Amino acid sequence: MVLAGGEGRRLGPLTADRAKPAVPFGGRYRIIDIVLSNFVNSGLHRIKVLTQYKSASLEEHIARAWRLSPMLDNYIETIPAQQRTGKSWFKGSADAVFQCANILLDEDPDLVCIFGGDHVYKMEVRQMLAHHLEQKADCTVAAIPVPRHEARAFGVMEVDEEGRVLAFHEKVPEPPAMPGRPDMALASMGNYVFRTEKLMSLLEADAQDDNSSHDFGHNILPRMVEQGEKVMVYDFDQNVVPGEDAGARYWRDIGTVDAYFHAQMDLVSTAPQFNLYNRRWPIRTGINHDPPAKFVFRDEANERIGSATESIVNLGCIISGGRIHRTVLGNRCRINSFSHVEESILMDNVVIGRHARIRRAVIDKDVEIAPGAEIGYNLDRDRERFFVSEGGIVVIPKRARIE
């Protein structure tokens, strides 16, 4: 089960019309494609995606892009909030699963994976399942080691030498250290494996608790530890993904505009930490029929050259005498003559007019930038018209016309 109902308020205008897992990433993908690829690449092909907030584009994407074989009883299906247990929408992550308990009863699985739908990482999920079974755990929580001074921003786990969780700590000033690694702490990734029988009993008890916020991290897991249930940690650093280099594993919570921006700037680097080009572990998405990207004009005397450096350019784009550098282009973008786009993210169908200058911006789909316009060069002026993040990233909303 993938929890994909997140509102994503900290992403500003990018989630004005869509759920956070539906936000484009890397030009041709949606954020939800990352967790779905991890499951499918791991050989897990029965997946329910729980949606709620402005879910239309997310549900359309999954229906059109993610069609597994019904002959083999494989599926990826979205389950919107349905008020099955009362006149309320999902109250929290645990309540979302509780309201969809009929799915678990119908399928009758031994184990349930409950993963978030809005993080960037690669995981071979079967290795976590094997660890869960080996430890005979009631619940296993995936965690990534982070420096203790950084762990203050996360929910962290206190564990014993065997990896059994002793306590959960939410954004505390002095996070508990990992056993044997005093400079590191274990931050929860929001990915869980449960024994189904145990999960159902916990959810039923939580639903009766009016004082609960009905959240896995805040309520279900701490209660399990208090009751002496066997909650184990799975160290993400031990996960081995085919085709990936050994070493520290990459995981990012892209909940803010700045985190979202920097995660994509990683993609255009010479040796990205999140590698899209590993053919043994592809990030999967839908197929479209746009033509190849095209670069035109080479008038060096007048600096009218269609060029792209350290960039990702997707299908249907035309770089028509303009220049881009360290930029991610979605499908069907057009960069017109004498324009310059640097360190930016452009979603589908963006048109950059002649002589325009753009830097450190995220431009949503179907935007037109007028000839000669400037974005990212005067942040005080940009703040009068647009959302500007704490890190100075300008966000242009969908279908805007910028003069």
Image: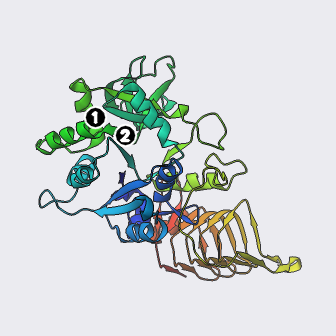
Mark 2 closeness class: few <14, some 14–19, many ≥20 residues within 10 Å: many
Q: Is residue 232 above or below residue 290?
A: above
The answer to whether 139 appears left or right of 296 in the picture is left
> Residue 339: which quarter of the image?
bottom right
The quarter of the rendered structure image containing the C terminus is: bottom right
Q: Which amino acid, by three-letter code, is at mark 2?
A: Tyr
Q: Which mark is residue 376?
A: none
Q: Nearer the viewer, residue 262 or 392?
A: 262
Q: Which amino acid, by three-letter code, is at mark 1?
A: Leu
Q: Nearer the viewer, residue 288 or 272?
A: 288
Q: x, y percentage for residue 215?
A: 26, 44
Q: Which mark is residue 221?
A: 1
The answer to whether 159 appears left or right of 181 in the picture is left
CB of mark 1 within 8 Å of CB of mark 2? Answer: yes
Identity of the residue drawn at 66% across and 76% down: 317
The disc, 1 or 2, on the residue closer to the chain's N-terminal end is 2
- Give SS at disc 2: strand
Please indicate, yes or no, whether residue 4 appears anywhere in the rendered image.
Answer: no
Q: Which mark is residue 192?
A: 2
Please indicate, yes or no, whether residue 361 appears anywhere in the rendered image.
Answer: yes
